[in-house]
Image: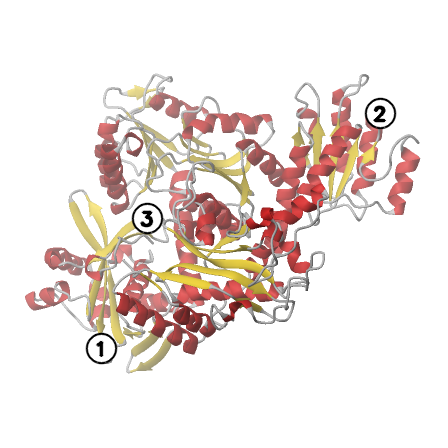
Amino acid sequence: MAGSGAFDPAYYSAEEILRDGGSIHVRAIRADDRERLLRHFKELSEDSRYHRFFGVKRSLSEAELTRFTQLDFIDHVGLVATLWHGEEERFIGVARYVRSTAPARAEVAFAVVDEHQGRGIATVLLEHLGRIARVAGISEFEADVLGDNNRMLEVFAKSGFRVKRASAAGVIHLAFPTAETEEFVAASDAREREAAARSVAWILRPKSVAIIGASRDRTKIGGAILANLRDGGFTGALYPVNHAAVEVQGIRSAASLSAIGEPIDLAVIAVPAAAVEQEIDRCARAGVHAVVVITAGFSETGAAGREAEMRIRDLARHSGMRLVGPNCMGVVNTEETVHLNATFSPGQPPAGNIGFFSQSGALGIMIFEHLRNRHLGISSFVAAGNRADVSNNDLIAYWARDAGTTVIALYLESVGNPRNFARAARDAALIKPIVAVKSGRSAAGKRVASAHSAALANRDIAVDALFAQAGVIRTDTLEALFDVVAVLSTQPLPMGPGVGVVSNGGGPAVLFTDACDAQGLMLPEFQPATIEKLGLRLKTTSNISNPVDMTASTSSSDLGDAMAIVGNDPNVDSVVAIYAPPIAGQPSEAAAAIARGAAQIPAHKPVLAVFQSPGKMRTGLDCAARGTIPTYSFPENPAIALGAAWRYSQWRSRPRGSVHALSSFARDTIRAVIDRALSHAGGACALSREEITTILRAAGIAIAQSEDSAATPDLPAGPEESPSGIAMFAGITTDPIFGVLISCGFGGPIAELMGAAECSGAEEPRPEVAGRSPEPSRRVRSLRRAPKDDAAFRLHPVTDVDAAEMIASLRSNRLLDGYRDTRPGGREALAALLTRISALVEAIPEMVELELHPISVQPSGQGTIVLDARMRLEPPR
């Protein structure tokens, strides 16, 4: 749901997608809507009027039209769902609520034009009315529905609201709270995802395609697209549109879209930028469901181009269409029943099981070629260009439901709406993996802020947090993306971190082993039976521990047999074969041996290969029993790819986690402090220590009595004694795009220096005691005043599982397990503190900055103590 800036229900406006994939515009009723509302009433059937007005009604009086259009948007709120037909805006649905004598209660009513009933319009309007009602302080909706009005009863039943029913004299009285319950949010999210997927289906599974700007010249974009559609075997109807030709590339051409006279699902537009708006208007009039605008010259060119892009986007959406582009390469679907290649790429893309979204059309041709070289292929591909309408979120929703897609790959320059991305990606990643490379790491600057957590947070950290919570595998480069996708699209997910390695060269095996350690993988010991089998099969000079070093003189046959033996060891979860060509022997023989060995390994275990051959030995590594075996040129690459697959496997099997909810008493206490502070300040303000103390304690966060006493609770008498707590920090910072990020990290110099001390053998620096420190060395003094970058971030809301993962991701997290003479700290208590901070964010939307530093993390079971805190508020805009 996309709203429109500052919230004022009289100017309410949003775009929505319906369950059949069509789009509508939702807006507030205006005083000038009398004629449109009257026409809407006349288009209702007698049956629909009867159900709406509980009796026969032939017309609306002037007084009724005035009452229905001149609303105060306080006690009487009305919304309409509209579609544009040429120059005319049509109402296809009307919804309103009227506040009753009980100020927290309102009655709702709906009317949808018959030809548009069953599309989910009433459900959408109900959700928007609920949003407005919650802001207006209305906590309960009521509705009276005739007993035979099954469609409207179904709307309420499936809305996600907790509906109570009572019936009398053939009328069913419904009542339900407007609050966003878990059931409501789940139903709303499911509806949005299903609608998005259906809308993409018009783009990727059309039964008819019109190419506007089709050309006889295949070197022109319109000609190349038509040729690709025809040569690729598109299974639907093709309609070239060229006003100057009767026939284009052997297909009968139409002078205009209206001259075709047949239903058009998808129109591909390749005309000069100045003509695009007119062509989209013609598509709207012809009832086209979706358009792909190949043409460049829009937002990428400046302010005028951005305005033109917004016009074509609004024209498309308000007319019920979805739009890909502009400035894009096109779309592909290799499904056997479709064979759609509406791009200007030379040749046909390889078919496979990867759904690929690219924000850059320039990369498309390279992507196709690279996939072909690696024996991989796409199920479908969308290069969205300027992404004016259809986005990666829509494609994720589609691919999550597409049986032909097993892996989703994304090249992103921006993530769009982070909250929408998080919901779409998280739900899809529970079904199939998502691998993404996002450009712009170096361009993201650190935000200038006074709080430690804000100083550490930058836009790229927010992307990392978003991906981590959504289960998205992030890679730094396109090459790494292909490495990971190669595993996920051809192999099962690893069931554990144990890797069995068979190599005919010691050096590459060592490099692979080191890379595994860095990726959280391990090389387990083989079981005795495995060692015995290897000893009988291999030469006595071979090392038959893990990794198995067969030496360069080993035959190709031995390589395949060793793989089979290692792969059947119960301790091994994945197998990697490493082949470096010796002086004697043919690489093709080794490739065949690897394929033969892979066929004897249980199907639930991934098999990868490193093939260090001067030539590209891809063909020989196709295994009939297992399909393509992903191959790599360097030993580190498969370790990185396999590590990503293992971490994703862990993420998918982890519990979803739960958020902390404050009690009503705690919320009331906190809101009283916040409201008083904002009223007194008259704007943005920083809270006093006393106010912060009240808020934190209401949330269940322990804080020292005062700044003077902050250094004394339970601390040792002198620096020679062991510290009682581990110094850390936590807080929030607010990003204008990503929203609130919750952070935690270590706040003392010990976290910065302990790694260096271990590596250099230097005398270890003394740990900082939370609230007081021993006399530091000069080196420690220079690091005393600010924590460094050992911090973790997650987007709000943070679950208990998210909090535990944040702590585990800190480089210095072993301090919490006890380090040298430092007692262990309570991970559970720290995780609980982070979830309570997230609960505070929910209760205090005005909070833009919170810094708790230092925090004394006490030994396990003794909790945490905040020693100093600051909080800054800004009134909502």
Mark closest to the chain's N terminus, 3 or 1 = 3
Left/right of residue 761 with respect to residue 197 in the rendered view:
right
Mark closest to the chain's N terminus, 2 or 1 = 1
Position of residue 79 relative to residue 373, above or below, is below
Please name the colour scheme applied to the rendered image.
secondary structure
Q: Inspect this view and state whether residue 337 appears.
A: no
Residue 796 percent location from the top left of the image? 45, 58
Residue underneath mark 1 = 100
Q: Nearer the viewer, mark 3 or mark 2?
A: 2
Label 3 with label 1: CB-CB less than 8 Å: no
Q: Number of numbered discs present?
A: 3
Q: Inspect this view and state whether residue 377 appears.
A: yes
What's the CA distance linking mark 3 and mark 1? 35 Å
* Residue found at x 22% / y 77%: 100
Residue type, numbered disc 3: Gly
Mark closest to the chain's N terminus, 3 or 2 = 3
Q: Residues within 10 Å of mark 1 (few under 14, many from 20)?
A: some
The disc placed on residue 72 is none
What's the CA distance linking mark 3 and mark 2? 62 Å
As drawn, the residue found furthest toward the left would be 62
The disc placed on residue 22 is 3
Residue type, numbered disc 2: Ser
Quadrant housing the N terminus: bottom left
Circle 3: element type: loop
Residue underneath mark 2 = 555
Q: Residues within 10 Å of mark 3 (few under 14, many from 20)?
A: many
